[in-house]
Image (cartoon, rainbow, N blue to C red):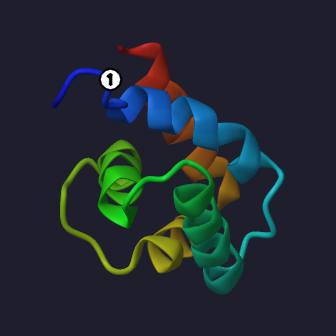
Amino acid sequence: MTKGERNGYSVLGDLLPALEAADWTAAALEDLLKGFCEKNALGMGKVAQPLRVAVTGTTVSPAIGETLALLGRDKTLARIQRCLAQR
């Protein structure tokens, strides 16, 4: 990580409110994540990887929008909140 670079926790913290308000479909979640990346000048990997680890516990999963949709809103949000609480 370079000086001034955002870490995964800050990305998750900033992303959480948007996820809480999101339509919970794979397509809507993918669009939300792409928009978040553009707005924050971040590559998808800088957003998807911390999110993937927070919700699945691993660095490998299907497409992140599909993963979140399949896991469901309640489990996804709870896992992100738990991850943020453990930092």
Query: How many numbered marks, from 0 up?
Result: 1
Q: In the image, 1: left or right of 46?
A: left
Instruction: Locate residue 60, reporting x and y percent.
Output: 19, 67
Instruction: Locate residue 26, reporting x and y percent.
Output: 61, 81
Of residue 74 and residue 33, the one placed in the foreground of this image is 33
Residue at 56% in and 62% down: 38
Instruction: Locate residue 56, reporting x and y percent.
Output: 33, 54
Label 1 sits on residue: 4
Q: Is residue 39 above or below residue 23?
A: above
Residue at 37% in and 31% down: 6
User: Which quarter of the figure is the C terminus placed in?
Assistant: top left
Image quadrant of residue 34? bottom right
Q: In the image, 75: left or right of 87?
A: right
Residue at 33% in and 30% down: 7
Q: In the image, 34: left or right of 22?
A: left
Density class for disc 1 (Cα within 10 Å; few <14, some 14-19, many ≥20) is few
